[in-house]
Image: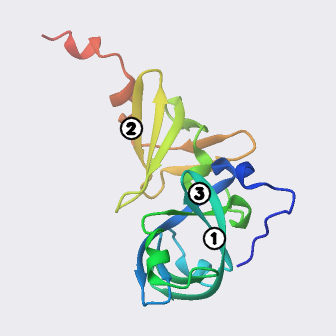
Amino acid sequence: MAFFLPLHVHLHMLRKEDHFILGYVKRTVGTQGELVIQLDADNPQRYAKLDAVLLEVNGALTPFFITKTNLREDQLTVKIEGIDELFAAKEYIGSTCWLPLSVLPQLDDQHFYFHEVRGFELIDAQYGPVGIISEVMDRLMQPVVIAKNGYKEVLVPLADGVLQRVDRTERKMYVNTPEGLIGLYLNDDSAQNDGM
C-alpha cells in the first residue's frame, strides 16, 4: 500500500487530525533493526504491503520508508530504510504508528471508522437527539458509543440491529436502542428520589 507525502509538506505540517493510528511498535526482532508493529485494525491483511509509515517521534509524525514486510496475524514485521541495527531500532519501541486518512476505503452508511464519528450527533429512533459522540470504545462483544449530553454521558452498545445508519454529510449517527436505555442516562434524577 503506497501513500505519498507531497514535496511541499513540511514535517511540522503533518497534523494528527489528518491521520489515523495504525498501531504501535511492540518490539524489535533479529539483529538487523527490524520492528514489529502491533496493528490495531479490523483487517490486518490490508496493511501487509506497506511501503511507508509515520512514527510519532517526540510528539511529531515522522515518515519512514519500509523496504520489507512480513505479516503474522495482527503483527507486521517491518524493515525500515536507514535502521540497520538493533540498538537504533530499540529507540522506536512504544512509538505510535500512523497512516494518512486518505488510505482508508470509503464505507457504506452501515459501517464506520471509530475516529470518523467523533463530533457526530447521536439520534435514537424513540428518544430523538441524544448528544454528541465523544468516543467509540472497542469492546469484545460490540463497540460502545459514548455521547455527551451536557454534563451526562450516554453509553450505547452497538449490538446487532442498533445501528441504523451513519449520515456523513449531516454528521449524524442514527440508532434504535432498546426501550428505556437512553432514559436511564438522561431522565431527571429527581424523579428517582421522589419515593424516598
Q: CA distance from mark 1 to mark 2?
A: 45 Å
Earlier in the chain: of badge 1 and badge 3, it is: 1
Element carrying mark 1: strand
Q: Badge 1: few (under 14), some or many (20 or more) residues near its Cα, within 10 Å?
A: many
**Residue 52, horizontal then vertical, whole percent:** 67, 75
Cα separation, mark 3 vs mark 2, equals: 26 Å
Quadrant for the C terminus, please.
Answer: top left
Three-letter code for the amino acid on which mark 2 is drawn: Glu
Q: Is residue 17 left or right of residue 76?
A: right
* Amino acid beneath label 3: Tyr
Task: Name which residue lies at 15% across and 11% down.
Answer: 195
Amino acid type at circle 1 is Val
User: Where residue 170 appears, x then y in whole percent?
Assistant: 72, 39
Picture disc at residue 53: 1
> Label 3 neighbourhood size at 10 Å, few (<14), some (14-19), many (20+)?
few
Image coordinates for residue 41, horizontal then vertical, percent: 51, 69
Q: Quadrant of residue 179?
A: top left
- Decide if residue 110 is in sight here: no
Give me the C-alpha separation between circle 1 and circle 3.
19 Å
| Residue bearing the label numbered 3 | 113
Find disc 2 in the rendering and name its residue.
179
Which is nearer the N-term, disc 1 or disc 2? 1
Camera-nearest residue between 145 and 77 = 77
